[in-house]
């Protein structure tokens, strides 16, 4: 006797869109303090190196909402990466 197999497709769920880490995201990621507070800066630099076409979008918004030391660290990293790759640094880091 033949076996009938019924295939039912699941509704298509859109895949989550992965957004690159932006400089504006860094203050919240660094807020915890501790020995790993600089990991977000390293992750930002790695994504900067990997995603050439999205670099301008990654620095479009200014980082806000953290202490002055963290803002200076973020500005130094963004400014250095922009200088190295010939991209105009945003006014927030100059």
Image (tube, rainbow, N blue to C red):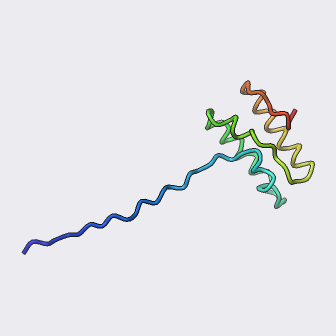
Q: Residue at x 89, y 43 (%)?
A: 72
Name the side, left or right, on which 51 lies relative to 88. left
Rendered view: 93 above or below 63: above
Closer to the camera, 53 or 81?
A: 53
- Percent across and percent down for residue 15 are 50, 55
Name the side, left or right, on which 53 lies relative to 36. left
- Percent across and percent down for residue 51 are 62, 37
The residue furthest front is 11
Closer to the camera, 3 or 60?
A: 60
How many numbered discs sit on the rendered protein?
0
Quarter placement of the N terminus: bottom left
Rendered view: 72 above or below 89: below
The residue furthest bottom is 1
Rendered view: 69 above or below 32: above
The residue furthest left is 1
Kindly indicate the quadrant of the structure image that contains residue 30. bottom right
- Percent across and percent down for residue 77 are 80, 39
- Percent across and percent down for residue 2 are 9, 71
Q: Residue at x 86, y 54 (%)?
A: 65
The residue furthest right is 68
Quarter placement of the C terminus: top right
Q: Residue at x 84, y 40 (%)?
A: 75
Kindly indicate the quadrant of the structure image that contains residue 8. bottom left
């Amino acid at each position: 006797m033949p076996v009938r197999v019924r295939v039912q497709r699941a509704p298509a769920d859109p895949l989550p869109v992965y957004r690159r880490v932006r400089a504006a995201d860094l203050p919240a990621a660094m807020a915890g303090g501790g020995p790993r507070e600089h990991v977000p800066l390293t992750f930002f630099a790695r994504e900067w190196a990997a995603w050439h076409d999205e670099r301008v979008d990654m620095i479009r918004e200014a980082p806000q909402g953290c202490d002055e030391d963290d803002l200076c660290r973020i500005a130094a990293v963004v400014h250095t990466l922009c200088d190295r790759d010939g991209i105009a640094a945003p006014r927030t880091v100059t």
